[in-house]
Amino acid sequence: MEFFQFELPNGIRCIHRPSKSMVSYCGLTINTGSRDELPGEHGMAHFLEHAIFKGTRRRKAFQINSRLENLGGELNAFTTKEETVVHATALKRDFAKAAELIADIVFNPTFPQKELNREKEVIFDEINSYKDSPAERIYDDFEDRIFAGSSLGHNILGNKRAVSKYDTSDALHFHRRTYNTDQMVFSSVGAMGIKRFRDVCERSFGSIAANPRSFSREESKENPVFTVSKRHSTFQAHCVLGARAYSNKDPRRLPFALLVNMLGGMSSNSLLNIALREKNGFSYNIEANYTPFSDTGIMSIYFGTDKDKVDFCFELIYNEIKKVILGKITPRQFSRMKKQFIGQLHISMESNEGNMLSAGKSLLVYNKVEETAQIVKRIEKLTLTQLIEVGKEIYQQPLSSLVYQ
């Protein structure tokens, strides 16, 4: 079934796909993340994601936490560099309650200082947990250097010193400035008709006053290539190699995503996994990643290995990249990799929750949602020449590297 969509007078866009499931999935995707923080607001977007659960004009924190859980459902949220998403899962009969609860915590938070002080300790534990994981920390460190000097260049969690200072007025100010109704999409997948979906949206979100965005994001400047090695007391070396890549509106995004998946995607037959793990036993975990943003993007290759194998691994990675750039991928290999990519897409779309989240972000970023069949057709039309071209453009530029060892 296709998605049905409409826009409320306040600018909030709503999108729904009917399904036969007894479970409803819904979420509000907000075009606000850590890159929208001003100087002195490091970690505020993530802090606010926690803070909206701490009380509203109608509910205390425990009432928010138990509203859906008492019915067998759940309420959750996450923050990225460009989005904040508040989402819920509930039985179809409780969909209206889920939508109303999301609207209440997003638009009516009171940020009581006592609750904020308690939640700061939770965030500090989250920061400590992240610091204990070099495989995660190295990604943020790498992005800090790639995007140095811009709001894309700091981690989402922030630091203890900054977060410890935030109070009710800080949260209210950031909320008023960045939670803009024309930058929001409410998405849903569940067993309900279009009329009921519209009625619930109008009842939950329709009376909210319009709050259009009055600022724009600054573009991040280019930074010099770097090669950095840092001492860390870990059993193995953690390494990242990468550079800037295409934005989420660049037409070269799709062939590049296919190339990244071919090099180091989730499958055990990726080129880098075969070269480093299967043939040589150098690395348990090797992966290639690509994250597009609104004005730029980043690609990276991560691996962990014995400290005396780092140089060997880098050499093997560059050899596999050269195979692509020099056109040594056969048409048969390319055809198989496209089929694999399409298969992974279909499997990912089997998740109703994934469908709901994907639709929300797609409508927010592109003002449309492509059906899976349309995306498949675009993948099928990709050529080996396109793959080689994006490979040359991204991987032939000088690449930066960061090593913890």
Image: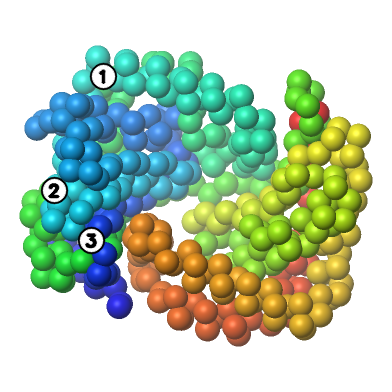
260 sits left or right of 194 in the view: right
Which residue is the site of mark 3? 22
Circle 3 packing at 10 Å, graded few (<14), some (14-19), many (20+), is few
- Element at label 1: helix
Q: Residue 25: which numbered mark, if any?
A: none
Q: Position of residue 122 (x, y in %)?
A: 40, 21
Which residue is the site of mark 2? 97
Mark 1 belongs to which amino acid?
A: Glu
Residue at the image position 71 percent from the left and 59 percent from the top:
268
Q: Position of residue 86 (x, y in %)?
A: 31, 45
Q: Position of residue 1 (x, y in %)?
A: 30, 78
Residue situated in front as seen by the camera: 235 or 31: 235
Task: Tell me, yes or no, whether the two marked residues, 2 and 1, touch with CB atoms within 8 Å.
Answer: no
| Quarter of image, res 372 | bottom left
- Element at label 2: helix
Residue at the image position 30 percent from the left and 48 percent from the top:
87
